[in-house]
Amino acid sequence: MPIGIKESTVLESFDGKIEEVSLEESKYGNQYVMKIVPFNKELIKQGKTGAFWNFIRVSETATDAEVPKDSVLEKFITATNRIDKDVKAMNTVPDFMNKLKGRSYTFTSEKLGKSFGGHEARPIWLPSKLLTEAKK
């Protein structure tokens, strides 16, 4: 009898809306904290917020107008700019992040960073497709 294959139970993508984005201090430096609310509320298996969260570290060498090449922040901005021309028009990181509030995307889980200090890179929810009002 051949070996059976079943569907993965790990959530790899979902449709949702970015409700909040804020710049916060952490023990590892500044980071953007992003609250993403899925359209399908049943996707949240645990937690009290009803949301998924992105924590995107801001490198010490980043400025409002420039981010280091190959940083998680640069990869996030580049990927989002590919699918959303409205955010691509933003000239600063704070303006870009502020423009994301209220926007809806299909999000996919991706590891953008590198392993560091014995810790594996954490996946983040990366916008992969812009959703229009009609699809919500």
Image: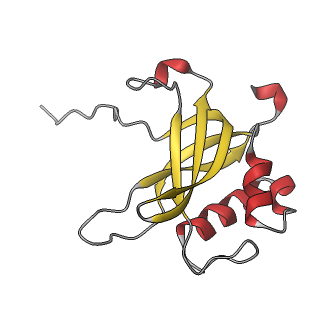
The color scheme shown is secondary structure
Where does the image place residue 59, in percent across and percent down from the top left? 54, 73
Residue 135, compared with residue 109, is above or below; it is above
Q: In which quadrant of the rendered view does residue 131 lie?
A: top right
Where does the image place residue 122, in percent across and percent down from the top left? 39, 56
Residue 94, compared with residue 67, is above or below; it is above
Q: Tell me which residue sits at (21%, 32%) in the image.
A: 4
Q: Tell me which residue sits at (41%, 61%) in the image.
A: 27
Viewer-proximal residue, 43 or 19?
19
Residue 136, compared with residue 11, is above or below; it is above
Where does the image place residue 44, in percent across and percent down from the top left? 45, 25
Q: In the orientation shown, which residue stands out farthest toward the left?
A: 1
Viewer-proximal residue, 95 or 127?
95
Q: In which quadrant of the rendered view does residue 10 lie?
A: top left
Residue 89, compared with residue 53, is above or below; it is below
The reply, left or right, for residue 65 in relation to residue 108 is right
Q: Tell me which residue sits at (69%, 46%) in the image.
A: 129
The reply, left or right, for residue 53 in relation to residue 135 is left
Where does the image place residue 60, in percent across and percent down from the top left? 55, 77
